[in-house]
Amino acid sequence: MVARVEGRLDDLAKRFDRSDWMELLAAVLLALATIAAAWSAYQATRWGGNQSNAYSEAAALRAEANEAETEAAEGLEVDVEMFSTWLVLAAEGNEQGAEAIRRRLRDEFRPAFDEWLGEAPLSEVPPGRPFDLPKYDEIAGDAAREAAERFRAADAAGVRAREANQTGDDFVLVAVIMASVLFFTSVSTKLRSRSLRLIMLLLAVVLFAVGTAFMFSLPQSVAI
């Protein structure tokens, strides 16, 4: 029984000679490398889109941050001007004018101003400034904090865009490697020398293994 099986295996091995193995290997490499190259091209396109979206997001966030920063600066400028006017009127003893200015203060500034004004006896100007109180930073500083948060978000979006760009470049490199696999495999099918065919196939196998490992080490982006 064992001898009969061994005999059949020997007959099969003789029929399936070395050239058949190389032709089969070349066909498999051509198919797999074509698929890998197509997938890499798709991924490079996907990551290019991710990069574009991230850069657009970063630009939008920076525009919003600049707007919030401008709003914060303008609010502070208004508060300082109104406060300076109030000090002049208070120093002149114009209580009616000072009260009129107080009523016209911004809603973000009035709580801090009232707290600062309440720290001194009536008809006296308190030391310091209302801008130094925590309440002013708590209320009037919202725009500045919003601007800072949006700047940080824009920086993060910029980092994602650069990472997406690098990933897309890496997939382009994989596609180039797979194109080399296709080249060496195709050349091997045209050669008559079995040793040269084997060398070309071995080069193609090594390149395919390296390219495949590199491809699967990269983040994948898929959308339906």
Image (cartoon, helix red, strand yellow):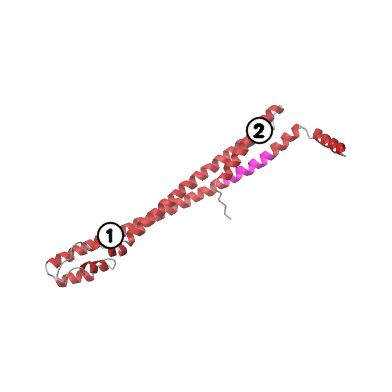
Residue located 54% across and 49% down the image: 46
Hey, what amino acid is under mark 2? Leu
Residue located 40% across and 55% down the image: 61
Hey, what amino acid is under mark 1? Glu
Q: Name the outermost residue toward the left.
A: 92
Question: Is residue 72 visible from the viewing direction of this image?
Answer: yes
> Could you tell me residue 193's position as x and y percent?
71, 26
Query: Please, is residue 82 above or below residue 181 in the view?
Result: below
Q: Which residues are magenta?
A: 28-41
Residue that badge 2 annotates: 202
User: Residue 132's mark?
Assistant: none
The 10 Å Cα crowd at callout 1, few under 14, some 14 to 19, many 20 or more, is few
Give the quarter of the image for residue 65.
bottom left
Magenta stretch prevailing secondary structure: helix
Q: Is residue 117 magenta?
A: no
Residue located 66% across and 29% down the image: 199
> Could you tell me residue 18's position as x and y percent?
75, 32
Residue located 41% across and 54% down the image: 153
Residue sitting nearer the eye, 156 or 224: 156
Residue that badge 1 annotates: 74
Quadrant the C terminus occupies: bottom right
Q: Is residue 30 magenta?
A: yes
Residue sitting nearer the eye, 157 or 179: 157
